[in-house]
Structures are given as C-alpha cells and as structure tokens.
Amino acid sequence: MQLSSLLLRFNEPETLKMAKLGRALKAQGADITDLSLGEPDFDTPDHIKAAAKKAIDENYSHYTPVAGYLDLREAICAKLKRDNGLDFSPEQIVVSTGAKQSIANAVLSIVDAGDEVIIPTPYWVTYSEIVRLGQGVVRFVQTTIENGYKITPQELEAAITERTRLFMFSSPCNPSGAVYSKDELEALAEVFKRYPAIFIMSDEIYEYINFSGLPGSGHESIAQFDFLKDRVIVINGLSKGFAMTGWRLGYLAAPLAVAKACEKIQGQFTSGANAVSQRAALSALTGDMQPTYKMLEEFGHRRKRVMELLKELPFIECSEPQGAFYVFPMVNHYFGMTDGEDTIANSDDLCMYFLNKAHVSTVTGKAFGEPNCIRISFANSMENIEKGFAKIKAALARLK
C-alpha cells in the first residue's frame, strides 16, 4: 500500500510525540511528571462554561457559518480594538478549530511552491511544517540568547530575497518566552516597509500570559503600524489565556483578501468551527477577565520559582521568559556525558534520558530550531514543578 508523498514533507510535532511517549510509560505504571505540554492546568472559568451549557439548551447544535458567527466576529473586533488598538471589520475575521488551523489557513492562502518564508528561531514547531506542507521553502534566522532570542532588523533584512513571501513569528514567543517591545517591532516594521510584497504573520496566542506590565497590558502587536495594515495576519485564540485548550477555538484577523482566501480554504477542510465553543468564546471575550488575570498571577509565581530551581542545576544557562509559560535553558554542557548506560549526544538524547530515567517529560530544543536547549513548561502545578525539577537535578547528577 502506497501513501501520499505529502507525508514525507513534514514531521510529527515533538511536543505531541513526547506527550504520547509519556502517556505510554504512565500506562505501564511509571510516575511521569509532565513538563512538556503547553496546556494550562486550570479549568475553564465558570462563566464561560455556563455560556456553553446555555448554548446547548438553546439548541446551538447546527452547522455554523464557515467564518464564524457574526456576533462572535464582532466581539473579536471589539477585543482587538479594546486590547490592541486595532481596527478590523467582522469580514476580516475567520474563526477556526484552534489557532493551529488559523495558521495553516494563512500559510496555505499565501505561499506557493518555492516561495520563501522567514522564521526566526527558536519558533513554534508547527510553523515550519505547515510551510513545508504547502511546498514553501523555510529560511530560518538564528537568534541568540544575548539578544533575548529576538530577531534584529539587520538579521531580518539579510534574510530577505526576491522569493520571500511571508515572515512568521510569535510574541510572546513559544518556546523562549521572548516579548517584543513597541520599539523593537517598529524597527522590524521599517524593514518591511521597504519590501511591500512580504506578508507578516504575528502569532499572539500568549498575549495574556505576559509578565512585562500590569495584567492586560504590556502586549504590543506589529499590526499597530498603519503602513503594514494590509499585510499583517494576527493569529490568536482562546486556549492559553482562558484555559480552553480542549474547546479548539482560534481566530485570525487579516486583510480582507487574505481573510476571504482563508474562509475558502477552511470551507473545504472543516467548514465552520464548533457551535457551542463559539458561544463559549463569545462569553470569554466579552466577560469577566479576572480569572485570566488570576492565572497570570499564578504563572508569575511559578516563573519565579522555576528560575530559582534552574539556578540549582549546574552548568545551565537560561534567560528569564517575559511571556508564555516556558523556560528554554541551554543544556549543551551535558552533551557527551553518560550515566554508565546512556550517552547524551544531543538535546534529543537528554530529553529521552529525562523521560526514561527520571520520568519527566520535556521537549528537545531541536524541534524549535535551537538544538542546544530544551523546553520546560511551567503550565503545571507548583507541586509537580518542584517534583519534576528534583528528578531532573538527580538525573543530571548521575551524568559524568
């Protein structure tokens, strides 16, 4: 039996792979501490759940418009104006089955075979694979810990060619936690001003998990610059800021032609997103933000503790994340070491060593374009964070 060559263009996400391996070991009786997945350990706020229950009672059980319910798209426009100072019309919004589908819609509507897409590293694992699935060419730009894992205007300009079609990035960033300031975004925008054929995809799913200001502040979007308005696609969703991962609800805001293209593509893949999730999302975007701010406060406590725990690990270098809920430590000091049974050649080996010998799941930095690092999530309870780091510390001590 021969399957499509399409499957050879992209890889399984390492984040999901590690979660799958962890579940398999757990099923065998191992006490696995999961520090791999980017899933808040909080429950969806009560007022959002109540809206979903009400929607069921009101028989929201039918097909939805491909782009999403009009009142939800209007609420998204109001949110973008309220929180980000951005002006969009409902026709420029497409609601999807998670932000990942929004990203796929955007890439597939813009990129042709052979087109180049610039992605600064480290980056979220799916960006490059969606580009490859669409037969685009990925051009990585290696950022450094010294620059806070943020691309500079000079690095951006050096990567642009006549084939460049799209630039993809996230702020706050998964996995590094980097957050771009307004000045940094403006400097990048000035580069894009000179190249009017390039689209910019700004992934802002971690907008509310931002430690650089008061709750609900500190986030800056590259879409705020008027001269880029017709080229920026903003990606967002409900998973991270509202603890709604399983509800699978994301959205994009884009120039009208791109939004219509995304709607056309989505119409053939999934059609409209889940009706009940959309009614819940309406409540999330227009309702009480205090549960989100309380989650942010708790993530702040965890970040502080994780940075303390990292300092107890010898030969580990790590920048403090300004957003999201990950740390991305450099672990290359341990490459070439062994516990007498396993030899650590790279970050892949180190993650498998932690999983098999310490029963802690993490994710290799290679998956994010930075092979000297690993990603550790603190979207877990303080108890599990303490437990996981104690296991990691003991496992590192056995390497010589």
Image: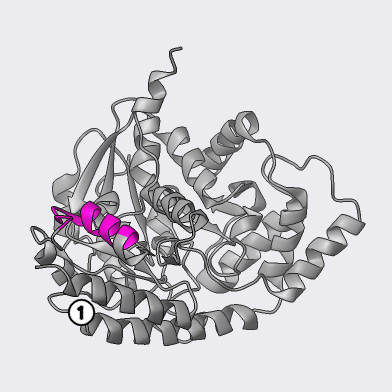
Magenta stretch containing residue 347, yes or no? yes
Q: How far from the left and from the top, in percent, is residue 82? A: 59, 72
- At x 31%, y 54%, the residue is 123
Secondary structure mostly seen in magenta is: helix
- At x 53%, y 66%, the residue is 240
Which amino acid lies under the numbered mark 1 shown in the image of this protein?
Answer: Leu
Q: Quadrant of the C terminus?
A: bottom left
Label 1 environment density (alpha carbons within 10 Å; few <14, some 14–19, many ≥20): some
Magenta stretch containing residue 62, yes or no? no
- At x 13%, y 60%, the residue is 340
Element on which disc 1 rests: loop
- Residue 346 falls in image quadrant: bottom left
- Residue 57 falls in image quadrant: bottom right
The single residue placed furthest to the top in the displayed view is 1
Do we see residue 225 in this rendering? yes
Q: How far from the left and from the top, in percent, is residue 3? A: 44, 17
Q: How far from the left and from the top, in percent, is residue 56? A: 86, 56
Question: Magenta segment, which residues?
Answer: 341-356
Is 14 located above or below residue 1 in the figure? Answer: below
The single residue placed furthest to the right in the displayed view is 58
Do we see residue 255 in this rendering? no
Q: Which residue lies under the disc numbered 1?
A: 313
- At x 36%, y 86%, the residue is 305
Q: How far from the left and from the top, in percent, is residue 24? A: 47, 51
